Image (spheres, grey):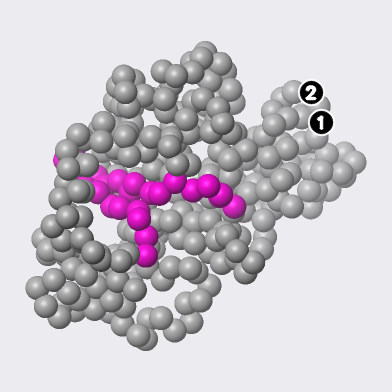
Amino acid sequence: MQYHVYADHNYYVAVVRGRLKKGKATTTNLIAVGDNVWITPTSPTQAVIERIEERHSKLSRRSPGRTPREQIIAVNVDYGVIVMAAHAPDFNKNRLDRYIAACSMGNVVPVICINKIDLADESFVRTEMAVYERLGYGVIYSSAKTGQGLDALCTVLKDSVSALVGSSGVGKSSLINAVQSDLGLKTNSLREGFWKGLHTTTTAELLTLDMGGMVVDTPGMREFALWHEDNNAWEDVLASFPDIEAAESLCRFRNCSHTHEPGCEVKRLVGEGKIEQARYKNYVKLTK
């Protein structure tokens, strides 16, 4: 496998030193976009990756297939900007909760970006997102076409490392190009002038912003299932449902799963409408 590495104002096509590959079969990709690596140049355009620095955050999912492994999307990012289209069928809160959980599990701050807001009933979308805003999540209502929400998006992206994630066709690349119009031209230039004909293991790209910061444009993902390193789904997911986490201390049983136990405070609040039923159902699905 070959990787593209930027170092000392130069781009290298790099391969991994053989010893690094040993014992790394738990993930589908040894190196991910955003990794900081040590290299030994072997020519003006080629290098060998000698070491991978420790990661402080990551976004990953469970890979498709009969023997699932962890598929790492991006690492060392500060914000995971979860892009959803405001219109059906992509406006899916179940998928949104999965992305939020993946961010929380990987030490990434989730930011919700509802794009193509000009194509939907904005008042309806804002009503649907009100519960997330009450819980403290940042929500941006954007349109790459009209420019709505771009200032708010720039506030997140400026001087940070962010990854835009979401399904195909939600407008991730369009938003990035709206933030900085020449990024598409720069990307094409690199592909044509340097990367043409090279086979890569990922289509995610780390782009530098003129205003400061970097952004990862990730490929659209048809499926997004959570990856649990230690199979402790309950604890992993709970952190991304602060409304449920706040109520669980009042449950009768300390190990309450909030599904069938008597004296469950979470179920009581769901019944009273104080915890949104749709989010509760998503929580139950994610912890099965």
Q: Is residue 265 magenta?
A: no
In the picture as drawn, the residue positioned furthest to the bottom comes out as: 19
Residue 272 bears which disc, if any?
Answer: 2
Asked if residue 45 lies left or right of residue 36, the reply is left
**Stretch in magenta:** 201-225
The residue at 21%/48% (across/down) is 187
Q: Between marks 2 and 1, how big is the CA–CA gap?
A: 6 Å
Q: Position of residue 181 (x, y in %)?
A: 19, 34
Please indicate whether residue 90 sits to the left or right of residue 273 in the image. left
Quick check: 232 above or below 102?
below
Depth check, front residue: 136 or 226: 226
Q: Nearer the viewer, residue 63 or 74?
A: 63
Which amino acid type is shown beneath numbered disc 1?
Arg
Q: Is residue 222 magenta?
A: yes
Q: Which residue is at a point 65% across and 47% down the rendered structure image?
A: 238
Q: Secondary structure at mark 1?
A: helix
- Secondary structure character of the magenta stretch overall: loop
Q: Picture coordinates of residue 142 (x, y %)?
A: 38, 25
Which percent across, then down, holds residue 154? 28, 32
The residue labelled by disc 1 is: 268
- Return the residue found at the far front: 197
Check disc 2 and give the amino acid type: Glu
Task: Residue at 69%, 42% (x, y): give it.
Answer: 283
Q: Is residue 4 left or right of residue 169?
A: left
Asked whether residue 76 appears in the rendered view, the answer is no
Q: Where does the image place residue 63, in percent across and percent down from the top left?
A: 55, 61
The answer to which quarter of the image holds residue 265 is top right
Residue 234 visible from this viewpoint: yes
Image quadrant in which you'd find residue 72:
bottom left
In the visual, does 204 lie left or right of 103?
A: left
